[in-house]
Amino acid sequence: NKELTNMLESSNEPPGDLVDLTHLHEPAIVHALQFRYERDEIYTNTGSILLALNPFKQLDGLYTQGMMELYWEEAGEKSVGNERDDAEGGKPPHVYDVAARAFGSMMRALEESRDGVSGSCNQSILVSGESGAGKTVTTKIIMRYLAILSQRMVMARSSTAEFDFNCEGSGVERQVLQSNPVLESFGNARTIRNDNSSRFGKFIEMSFEAKRTGRGTLLGASIYFYLLEKVRLVSVNPGERNYHIFYEVLSPSGMELEDRKRYMLTSSFGRGSTPSSVRDFRMTSMSGTFDRRDGVDDSDTYRELRMAMDICFSFDEQDGIFSVVSALLHASNLRFVSDERQSSGSEGCAIYNLDGTSGAVASLLGVTLEALETSLTASAIEARGERLIKKLSITKAEKALEALTKATYGALFTYIVMRINKSIEVRRDSISRGIDEVKSIATIGVLDIFGFESFEKNSFEQLCINYCNEALQQQFNRFVFKSEQAEYEREGITWSQIDFPDNQEALDLIEDRREGVFSILDEQCRLPRCTDKTFSSAVYDKCENNMNFAASRMQKSEGRFVIIHYAGEVEYDTNGFVLKNKDELPKGASELLASSK
């Protein structure tokens, strides 16, 4: 009987909130998530926390205006905090619900506060998970929904305002959302697990009007970033790509031919008409991977990027940005040869100038060819008031080029974020007159952080990323377990002590001021003759008694060690730790960038 079968299946359906499971243990949780996932129900609540499973496909009807409207009540001033009515035939778990509850909590706190913004008015949403889990897309969905809620507040106060579901108008909502394509092009890349992986962490703080006359109106936003993965510019693993921007400017249907010539991205360095391709530059071909597996065309994202940049950047600013991007592409093709002008036995080198690459790099960076060569092939030493010039070997010149590339792109990314912030910042004329600025703005922050990473080879970057996740896991433990237990005690509820994993030992291993891995690394970097080997030896000596540290004889002989994180064991290779931690730009390269016109 089909009807009876459906009834039985319906009765065995896992709840939308894991708290309501009859048996709350790992097999039951995994079964519930898998059951819902197979039915394209990718969102599941566990108390006030939302679990999201990446469907790796488009789901029709999940992000429509109708679905948005389901959660508008949660975003109202009279909505009830973390209470939800899922079990009462209400709303299914959704990321819109998280955003709406944050907005509603802010509005409610503002309504209850008579003297302006208090600490409880500001809200934060943490988006975390492993690489490829869908954090970047989820962050964009949250930002868009908060912008929609802001528009709805404006509509409620104005009879003439029209609702713009796609936020495609000219308002601040559109400006804030258009920052996403820019940040993705310059800060995201294809990795082994994820075709659009954010290679930096970001905290986006959206500011809203606090006073009653305009309460809930989005005024602007600020973006803070950290841990940009600059090593990707000079070393890309097989199966991965460099940052999207380099493939977008070289995509077949992206940049116009006239612009390609302007940035010397055609044959004969802009003099010919044959477009350069991703196979023509070491930066985009070193891994042998050129496309994306998710079906996204680089030409399409390039066009989206240019439309977004038209909002935040002037023509001259865009011209400068693409000149630098093109210069870095050409710089990846620079070669060094032994300098025949040097005396016998000297290890000096020079840039190979016959192919025209160095001239293109110098022109695009706005420096002279002589200054470029001097900055990469020589080092200046100040001694007793005299400036001595020492020629560099080919190996050291290649390292100087890598440092210049990473520093230039890092400065470019910082500039881009600064300009975006300038265009979307809260303007004083948008704040109610006569009101203290601090008390007239409430914020909702969205933290999008790297997922936990464990690859075949893990280096300094993975340690930094995993440390961030380790710290967030502790915050998660304290919020979920400790705060709940404290609330039970305040309310006089009888309960038994719940033991939960405490990762303080792992954090101490990394961050302890005296014997933590980072402290040891900083101490080694201050020594005149520090190397990766002296650093690894110091780590073995000081950390071997920590229960979250391990290193076998074989690992010690190869400069490797293991940290037991909350998410599992990760082996780190110390090769390059000292250089990456110093992150020094040679003085010659620094002077070169300063001389750019």
Image: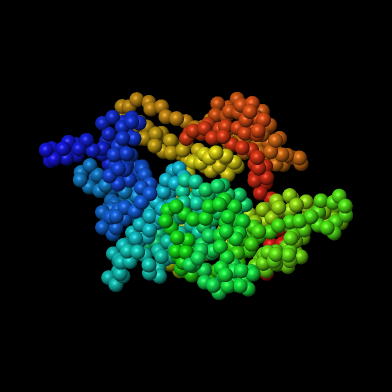
Residue at 11% across, 38% down: 1
Judged left or right of residue 338, residue 440 is: left
The total of numbered circles placed on residues is: 0
x, y percentage for residue 433?
A: 43, 67
533, above or below 304, in the image: above
Q: Is residue 277 found left or right of 118 in the rendered image?
A: right
**Viewer-proximal residue, 392 or 385?**
392
Quarter that holds the C terminus:
bottom right
Task: Give x and y (percent) for residue 120.
Answer: 40, 48
In the picture, residue 481 is in which quadrant? top left
How is the protein colored in the picture? rainbow
Question: Residue 175: image x %, image y %?
Answer: 44, 65
Q: Is residue 548 left or right of residue 378?
A: left
* Position above or below: 205 against 568: below
Q: Residue at x 50, y 65 (%)?
A: 252
Q: Quadrant of residue 390?
A: bottom right
Most foreground residue, 217 or 87: 87
Q: Dividing the picture into quarters, in which one does residue 4 lie?
A: top left
Q: Is residue 514 above or below residue 167?
A: above
- The answer to whether any part of residue 253 appears in the image is yes
Q: Please name whichever residue, 587 or 267, is drawn nearer the observer in this view of the structure.
A: 267
Vertical placement of residue 353 versus 63, above or below: below
Res 418 seen here: no
Residue drawn at x 63%, y 28% as measured from the top left: 554
* Residue 436 in the image, given as x and y percentages of width and height: 46, 60
392 displayed left or right of 57: right
At horizontal 66% and vertical 28% (from top left) the residue drawn is: 541
